[in-house]
Structures are given as C-alpha cells and as structure tokens.
Amino acid sequence: MAEPLTADRAAARPALGPVLLEYTLKALVLAGLCELVLYRLVSRLGMHLSKVAREYVVVEYALRGASSAGFALLNVSAILVFLALLVLLFEKMQGGRLRALDSAAVALTSLLLALTVVFLMFPPRMPGSIAYNALTAALVWTLVAQYARAHPDLTARAMILCYGLGVSGWLYYQISTTTYGWLGIAMAPPWVHEITRVGEAFMVAATFLVFAVYSGFTVRTSNRRQRRRVILYGVTWGALFSLLLVMDWLLESFDPSMASGFRQASQGIGWIFQMGMGYTFYLPFAFYLAGLLFWAYAVIKQISMGRRAGYGLVLMFIAGYALQLSHLTLFVVLGLLLITNDRRIGAREASSRSLPIGLSGRSPAEASGIS
C-alpha cells in the first residue's frame, strides 16, 4: 500500500510551470499597479509641483521617494513580464502540434522579446522604432484573430475588436509620426490626431464590453436572486452614470462658478491620467469612470475564480493607452495571450489535471471545463 500512496502523492504535486506562472503573475500585477501609481502618476505629477516642493521639504522628499521606488518597480515589472512570457511560450510549445495562428503568435512574440532585449542594449533609431511598432501591430492582430476564433460569441468578438482598434490607434500615431520624422517631412501625417482620438474611444468602449463578457451577469437566467442582482447593479450604475452627465448642466444652470471649478477638477484628473496612461479625457468623464468600474469588477470576478483572464485584463488596463515604454507593450501582449488561452492558473490547474475527480474535490461540471 505504501508504493501506490507514494505514487499518488508524486502525481498530485503540481508542475513547476503552472506554479511559477501563478506567482509570477501575482507579483507582476502588484508591481505593475505600484509602478503605475508611484512612477507614471505621482512622480510625473511632481514635475509640475516644483513650487510646492520648494516650499515644503516633506513634499519634495515624498516625490523623490515615490519616483525612486517607482523606477525600481519598473525594472522589476520588466523582468517579471519577460519571465511570464517565456513560461507561456514554453507551455504553448510543449502542448503538441500548433495551429497556424498559434505558430504565428509564438514566432512573433519570440521576435518581439528578442528585439526588446536588443534595443535595451543598443537603443534603436527611427527605423528600429518603426519596425518594433509594426511588429507589435502584427502580433496584436494575430492574437485578436486567435481570440475571435476561440470565442464565437458576438459580444466577446466586439470586445476584442474594440481593444485591437484602440491599440492600433496609438500604434498608427507612433509609426506615422516616426516615419515622417525619419523622412524629414515637416507636415503631420494624415488623420493622425483623429485616429488617435478614435482609438481612445475604442479603448473606452472595450472597458464596457469587458463587463458584458467576463462579469457573469445575465438577465437570461431562471435564478431570481442573480436576476435581482443584475437589475440592482444596472440601476445603480445607470443612475451614477446619468448623474455625472447631468451634474455639469445643473451646476451651469444654478452656479456657473461652481460648474467652472468642477470642470477644472475633472480636467486635472484627466491630465494626471494623460501623463500616466495616455488618456486625454476628451470624452465626458462619466464614460471613463463607468468603464473603470466595469473593468475593475470583471477583473476582481475573474481573479477570484482563479482564471488567467483576470490577470490578463488587469495587465491590459495597467498598460494604458499610450505604450511609451517597452514593458507596457509586453503587458498588452501578455494580457492578450492570457485571455486568449484562458484557464485556471497555478497549483489549482496542475492539481486538477493530476488528481482524480474524487481526490481533487471538483464536480463533474468543473472537471469538464464548465465554470
């Protein structure tokens, strides 16, 4: 009896790859969120608070500390995203014969990682930047096509299409302006500002569709409790959304000075996020706030279920709209890979594959992939 029990325990041990990916993703999400707040938001905001920093020494030291910690976390995030991508690529290549889109995704991701390493050691010039952004666009649309093929639902396809168009708006801005600068053309590329704004609108639309795809809310259910929850959330968020849209008009009608202060405050918030994430906030502020709430709920829902998609969605949000740094581009690629190859992560995934249903404690529905 000792030998079978020992064999079962050895089989029950989770594989190293899924466990490494689980803890790498958790550390990456934590480091990425802290880097977003401390480096891309607080430290860049400090550049425009020089007068306050000169008057108050505490503010100066706080901004310097935030900048130093954020820069260190930026390097940590870059290392972790490299590690996570390498683990995912190794996992996909170990999965057997790859399809055409899988092979293209693996090849393009490997090439992007290699180019990133080369450009870190040898800073690229304009042709190198153009090639890097063009390769990123090709990889993003390969993953978009792969996701659309794996998810026949129209809402899921609309969500990934909006996100792909949003990222493409920024990539078009980068490629077109860099190309014109390389060729010595002084005029602006055609439709560059309009396409950039349309791309931002598509990114905001994607945050709404993420909720429809990943929140698990549906009114087409026989469960009355779930139906009441859907109606409650819908009414609450709809009321908040309408209140933000109407507030400016009411303030303008009764107190124009207060309305001006409210607009300046919203512009200040938009300016901060423009510095950190590239959003210009030219749309009504209510759209951005509602999209953030929808995106956050879907992320928390998926992470609490132990799904890869939750980590992928939060990384895509951390990257923002303006992919000005190479590790932000890798955040987008990793996020798309995770939502495209969605499953339970880490020890739970490995143990569920190695243990029988009776030992793993999973129901037949969960064992068949139904969650």
Image (cartoon, helix red, strand yellow):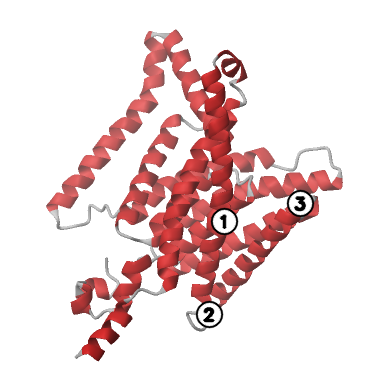
Quadrant into which the C terminus falls: bottom left
Q: Which residue is mark 2?
A: 98
Measuring from the top left, give residue 65's x and y in whole percent.
54, 32
Q: Position of residue 352 (x, y in %)?
A: 29, 74
On residue 267, the disc is none
Give the spatial CA distance, label 3 vs label 1: 18 Å
First in residue order: circle 1 vs circle 2? 1
Residue at x-position 45% and y-position 51%: 29
Residue 46 horizontal side relative to residue 21, left or right: right
Residue farthest front in this picture: 2
Image point (28%, 55%), residue name: 216
User: Mark 3, residues whose alpha carbon is within 10 Å: few (<14), some, or many (≥20)?
Assistant: few
Which percent across, then down, holds residue 80?
53, 57
Identify the mark at residue 123; answer none if there is no mark.
3
- Type of amino acid at the residue the image marks with label 3: Pro
User: Which residue is located at x 75 percent, y 42 percent?
Assistant: 189
Q: In terms of secondary structure, where does tag 1 sit?
A: helix
Left or right: 172 as drawn, with respect to 183: left
Q: Which residue is mark 1?
A: 79
Q: Quadrant of the N terminus?
A: bottom left
Q: Secondary structure at mark 3?
A: loop
